[in-house]
Image (tube, coloured by chain):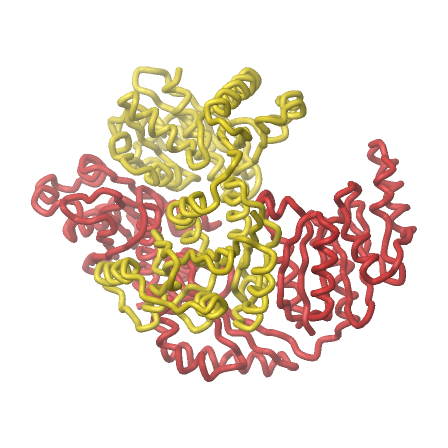
Chain colours: A red, B yellow
């Protein structure tokens, strides 16, 4: 079962619109067990679209087209597909009734070209549009099925979910389903992760193991192809256990939408602990990242941004002699900042960040040199030296991730 | 001059990642006068990629490939293109030196597969990667030019702008040039801006006027197509003056890469003034946004994150009775926070943020209700009530933008 997605629209080729429809449809089709082999974008040009259809028909069982169902002259997808398979276009009565209802209700003026939107491909099924006026079509000819959907994502998405997906499920009943699980890792690069898992990845076909590098972290997607859900879960559990035996020390959580800050806030909540911060180079980014999580007020009450020497002294009460002796890019300064922030905020943990965001060096240290302190009630305060790379923004973001990981690990200990 | 873009990566076909690279590259190529006829996405499969290259080579003068330059076995773009044009892969010494620098500095462990990232296509030009380890290539064979870029957008974008674009400009010089100028507006929505400028936009073909809505701001791109640069500048000046006469009160700066925070920091520097903050719902985001700007230490020394009532009292010295009487989501609280932050930090300005980030309401006020205070040395402190929409992140970001704009306007006054 091979599918491909063709998006039609010159605006996509000009870079004015992102092709999120292809992403949405790919995810939906994967979920239906239909494998997508190609995405293509082509402009509003019937000759190039026809050439593409000829090619696609040879290699795909299902071709999903999006865009070009509108009322204007450059909306040519329906005409081109109909001509390609030698079918005609016919009036869809339900779409026509909906069109009249819309214009009666909105009091907008209906123009002749609006009627084009209610035509469907003869011999196929109409796909009603719950969020717009353009009707879609699903039609099979010579072993290839064509699904035509409109371009605006706010029309395409509900239309696919409500009206197209059930027809596809009926037409292509799933033999096998794909079950997937995402594991998230911090503190290990993609290349090292893949090296550690090389034997496993190479010898593994079901589930497959796909690494993906994100800023400051790596995710692994395990995907099992199965006929039975229980069997799939068992396969995923087994592969996960093998992955964990090799790189488990870097694992921090599950899921596509999860993140290190969410996991850290959740751990703080579970432990009934609070966290504060004193931030120099990160300038509030650690605290602001905590603030992204709804309900964080339970574990975060406030903290300090001490960007200058002076505010380190006045806000936190750090001794000027400590800074004179050690500099601000120092273990001693990181430790003092974390301890003072913890005491002043009466929190269980406090994290401190002091170092060089760049682009210029500071105290003879290059950009990326960062001390991160962690004070914990009743424990000795520690500080770790890190060397981050890339630009100012990335260095600051890297430091925040490391700070979150230090808190998470301290709770887990 | 025909171009096409091929993105390589199974994650795109599974719908896990949106193909924003194609959008970015299309916009850049359009700007260079290079027309893009196709976008294609193909999985990490050398046979299908080779078939696509054969087809693309027949119809395009320039093929831009993104993705598949990484260290792992499924990163096969470089090998496939090299084989397609019968060139070999060779070591790029600059990329190798950069790789060694990175691992020496970061203390991460280098693995054998990292070296793959430093190979380029023989007979071409290396494209250095300012934000990562994978080097790109630009190579011409049989009248077709191949540009290979990495998949992660945070690497592809700076690499294209800094290192690939100048080479393309050299290789494909433009007859007519497009001169463009971007005007940035805060405090007016896209639909209102377009309404105000309707007459101008409709009657204008050179320069064209293209509005673009970004989170919390709108930009207008004026683009003149000319053979003479001076004439282009004159046309742009003239259109800009007409735009400004209609919506000039919302204008804050020029340029694609500029932003409200950069403009505000620049104004503070010019005025020789400093700024501080006391942040509740924004939780450090205002200060962290300032921290994104290199050299901000001249105008920003530090501030407070006072997320709870308690830290508003202990860090800032706000009277518990003031909060009891007015609540934290109040003009009085915003004013007290801004004043105290200004005094404690000895800054010229201080901004305060207190309100409801959501999703839940607070003190009977709905999410999005935010008071923003501005204290200025020697002037009465003010606070503005705002009602922001959308989700928690958007509300917090909206509040920060408004705070920056209040500082900028106070300096301009």
**Foreground residue, A392 or B335?**
A392
- Where is residue A188 drawn, in percent x and y? 34, 67
**In which image quadrant can residue B381 be found?**
top left
Q: Residue at x 54, y 59 (%)?
A: B6
Count of picture labels: 0
Q: Is residue A292 left or right of residue B295?
A: right
Q: Residue at x 56, y 51 (%)?
A: B3
Q: Is residue B15 left or right of residue A333?
A: right
**Foreground residue, A96 or B153?**
B153
Quadrant occupied by the N terminus of chain A: bottom right
Residue occupying the far front of the picture: B142
Q: Residue at x 55, y 69 (%)?
A: B50
Q: Is residue B411 left or right of residue A232?
A: left
Residue A224 vs B402, above or below: the answer is below
- Where is residue B57 drawn, in percent x and y? 56, 60
Quadrant occupied by the C terminus of chain A: bottom left
Residue B347 vs B20, above or below: the answer is above
Is any part of residue A268 visible from this angle?
no
**Foreground residue, A303 or A3?**
A3
Is any part of residue A213 visible from this angle?
yes
- Where is residue B229 drawn, in percent x and y? 46, 27
**In which image quadrant can residue B270 be found?**
top left
- Where is residue B391 drawn, in percent x and y? 55, 44
């Amino acid at each position: 079962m091979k599918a491909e997605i063709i998006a039609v629209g010159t605006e996509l080729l000009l870079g004015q619109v992102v092709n999120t429809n292809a992403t949405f449809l790919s995810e939906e089709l994967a979920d239906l067990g239909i494998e997508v082999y190609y995405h293509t974008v082509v402009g509003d040009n019937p000759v190039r679209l026809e050439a593409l259809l000829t090619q696609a028909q040879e290699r795909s069982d299902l071709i999903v087209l999006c865009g070009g169902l509108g009322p204007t002259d450059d909306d040519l997808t329906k005409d081109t597909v109909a001509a390609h398979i030698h079918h005609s276009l016919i009036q869809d009565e339900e779409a026509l009734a909906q069109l009249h209802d819309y214009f009666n209700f909105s009091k907008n003026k209906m123009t002749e070209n609006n009627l084009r939107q209610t035509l469907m491909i003869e011999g196929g099924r109409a796909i009603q549009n719950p969020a717009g006026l353009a009707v879609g079509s699903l039609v099979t000819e010579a072993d290839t099925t064509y699904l035509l959907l409109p371009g605006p994502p706010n029309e395409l998405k509900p239309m696919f979910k409500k009206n197209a997906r059930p027809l596809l499920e009926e037409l292509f009943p799933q033999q096998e389903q794909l079950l997937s699980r995402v594991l998230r890792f911090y503190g290990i690069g993609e290349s090292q992760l893949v090296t550690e898992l090389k034997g496993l990845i190479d010898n593994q076909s079901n589930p497959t193991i796909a690494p993906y590098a994100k800023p400051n972290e790596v995710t692994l997607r395990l995907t099992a192809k199965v006929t039975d859900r229980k069997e799939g879960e068992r396969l995923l559990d087994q592969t996960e256990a093998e992955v964990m035996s090799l790189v488990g020390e870097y694992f921090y959580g599950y899921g596509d939408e999860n993140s290190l800050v969410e996991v850290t806030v959740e751990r703080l909540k579970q432990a009934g602990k609070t966290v504060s911060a004193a931030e120099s180079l990160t300038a509030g980014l650690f605290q602001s990242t905590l603030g992204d999580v709804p309900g964080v007020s339970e574990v975060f009450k406030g903290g300090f941004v001490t960007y200058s020497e002076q505010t380190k002294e006045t806000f936190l009460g750090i001794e000027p002699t400590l800074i004179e002796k050690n500099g601000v890019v120092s273990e001693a300064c990181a430790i003092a900042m974390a301890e003072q922030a913890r005491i002043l905020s009466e929190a269980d943990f406090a994290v401190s960040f002091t170092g060089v965001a760049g682009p210029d060096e500071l105290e003879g240290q290059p950009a990326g040199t960062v001390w991160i302190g962690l004070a914990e009630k009743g424990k000795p305060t520690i500080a770790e030296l890190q060397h981050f790379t890339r630009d100012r923004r990335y260095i600051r973001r890297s430091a925040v991730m490391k700070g979150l990981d230090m808190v998470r690990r301290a709770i887990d200990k």
